[in-house]
Image (spheres, helix red, strand yellow):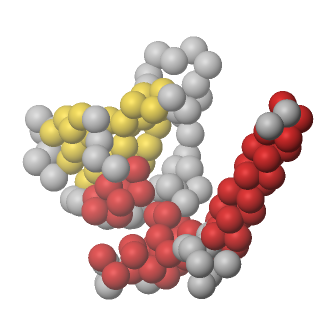
Amino acid sequence: MPPNTTTLLMVVLALGVFAVVVMTAFHEDIGPGLVSVSELFERHVTLCQADHPDWDQATCERIVRGEVWEGMTTPMLIASLGEPDEVDPSQIEPTHETWIYRTSTYGEEFFYIQGGTLDSWEPAPGCETCVPKKIRN
């Protein structure tokens, strides 16, 4: 075969494979389909509520967004941010703990837990560019 015919056949074959991939992505009968961001968000909210039936939908929505707020329980904080990098129990009050998270966005954050609920939050002390912040929403 002349080189032009071979090249043409390769292009046609590549386009055919591409068409099958695209059809599979968009046609539910052929493949799994694409999922929108809002649908993915709703799936995570549904999973959150299935794992924690005592939490309402608004609470699960905030947790899926990664929010924290005063009064949230420690299981809610873990569901929202994951396990802390460090837990520092209080030497004075046995019901007080400081949970430390290290992130690239906020640096080192301190979450003050009192009696199993989040009492307050602040960035690392001594950070020249940081200012104490309220609980992020």
Looking at the rendered structure, the number of numbered marks drawn on it comes to: 0
Looking at the rendered image, the quarter that the C terminus falls into is: bottom right
Residue 97 on image: x %, y %: 22, 44
Residue at image location 23% in from the left, 60% down from the top: 116
Q: Residue 4 or 132: which is nearer the viewer?
A: 4
Q: Residue 118 occupies which quadrant of the picture? A: bottom left
Residue 6 on image: x %, y %: 79, 39
Residue at image location 19% in from the left, 35% down from the top: 88
Residue 115 on image: x %, y %: 22, 59
Horizontal placement of 89 versus 14: left or right? left
Residue 7 visible to an observer of this rendering: no
Looking at the rendered image, the quarter that the N terminus falls into is: top right
Q: Residue 2 occupies which quadrant of the picture? A: top right
Residue 8 visible to an observer of this rendering: yes
Q: Residue 46 or 2: which is nearer the viewer?
A: 2
Residue at image location 44% in from the left, 22% down from the top: 125
Residue 5 on image: x %, y %: 85, 41
Horizontal placement of 114 versus 81: left or right? left
Horizontal placement of 100 versus 46: left or right? left
Q: Residue furthest right?
A: 4
Q: Residue 87 occupies which quadrant of the picture? A: top left
- Taking 9 as reference, is 46 above or below it? below
